[in-house]
Image: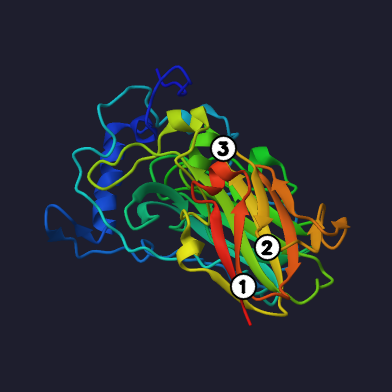
Amino acid sequence: MTKLPSPDTPQRLSDLIEPTTRRRFLANASVLSLAIPGVGAAIAACSPGAEKSTDSTTASQAPATAAQGAASPILHNPDSRLDTSLMKGGHPSSSAAGTTPATTTYHRFDPTLPPLGSGNLKLHWRTKQLPIRISDTEVVAAWTFEGDIPGPLVHCRVGDTVEFTLTNDVDIPHSMDFHAAQIDPKQAFRSVPKGESVTYTFKPKWAGAFMYHCGTSPVLMHIGSGMFGAIVVSPREPLPAAKEFVLVQSEYYLADAANGLRAFDYNKMLSTLPDYAMFNGRPNQYMKDPIKVKVGDRVRFWVVNAGPTHPCNFHVVGEQFDTVYLGSPPGSAIRGVQTWDVAPGGGMCFELLCDVPGEFPFVNHGFGHGQKGGIGILVVEG
Ligand SMILES: [Cu+2]
């Protein structure tokens, strides 16, 4: 009988997938990988989604509509049995073992807030399972929206219409929960099995930085495996001119590497002791490739904390936030803030005026997590 994993049942994430599904994923991972160190062979095929997310966002002028249902009339709430019907409670001896080693090309995740489009958003995303290189030494077996961790950055304004479609191309059911939406979750956020889609429409009511994530049970596993991202909702009245960046903090809980690939470890996720905490999917990525601005720039960080478990205590060393919006910008602004914690599942907007040149580390000042990769550099050039 199919059952949910439990804290009493030590399991690796990929062990929860039935063997045929796991083999298919790992076969796909091999195809999507570029080389096989140790074996010396190269795999010519390369998915276009393997290196960079392909945001299929398109702007449209579609009139606002009420939330609409999806193609399938069948309802599955995020905790439905369907969600776990493809998972097995057994314990295969390995996750990635026996597969070919994998390397993929590392890329920096661009933290720049995408510009606003000309109007409403029409998004059609697909689920993708693929290996993602998170550092010089490590590749993770990821579950994603559109092929990257985090998923595509979305930017719209209060009152815009967002028409969203998720098509599930993989064997495990997935779903999409936008925190910027006010909508019947049983309908809109339901899980869809392979080959099916869900479509819904929403109009963000409040400005802010909002998380989105897969809500399929167990949610911890789906968020922890990479299915999350950020939608920034700007107010109708523009905020002060600024260089705007999006930082999505998350944690990785990983099994030991097998042939160059690290699977996600569900039992570790339950233990809440991560291997890494980081901004935008790669530990320390903005240490080696900083965010750069100029003296006189106002910088606005839209910080989303995808978790799945720990807070992000956001701080910029050597600077102070002249403005932090406790609620929907531009309301509830407070001044002169050194550090503020962003809760898992939350998002906040931080502003600072860069009137001093230098290199300013931005960190999770919960330093156990700063030390595990939740740190970067803001370079202010004179
Ligand atoms: Cu999912």
Residue 74: x %, y % from top left: 57, 37
The residue lying at 73 percent from left, 49 percent from top is: 340
- Give, as a three-letter code, the residue at label 2: Gly
Type of amino acid at the residue the image marks with label 3: Ile
Pointer 1 or 3: first along the chain: 3
Q: SS for tag 1?
A: strand
Quadrant of the image containing the N terminus:
top left
Residue under label 3, please give it. Answer: 74
Dot 2 or dot 3: first in sequence order is: 3
Looking at this view, is 121 or 55 the one in front? Answer: 55
State which quadrant residue 311 falls in. top right
Q: Which residue is mark 1?
A: 358
Where residue 106 appears, x then y in whole percent? 36, 63
* Chain-order first, disc 1 or disc 2: 2
Residue contact between numbered discs 1 and 2, judged by CB atoms under 8 Å: yes
Residue at 34% in and 31% down: 15
- In the image, is the residue at mark 1 within 8 Å of ligand 1 by its beta carbon? no
Residue 294 as seen in the image, left or right of residue 355: left
**Circle 1: residue type:** Gly
Q: Is residue 242 visible?
A: yes
Q: Which residue is mark 2?
A: 318
Tell me what residue is drawn at x 51 percent, y 44 percent: 251
| Residue 345 pos. (x, y %) | 66, 44
Residue in the foreground of this view, choosing between 312 and 328: 312
Answer left or right for 242 relative to 271. right
Horizontal and vertical percent for residue 303? 66, 56
Q: Mark 3 near ligand 1 (CB under 8 Å)?
A: no
User: Looking at the rendered structure, which numbered label has been put on residue 368?
Assistant: none
Instruction: Reply above or below: 87 against 332.
Output: above
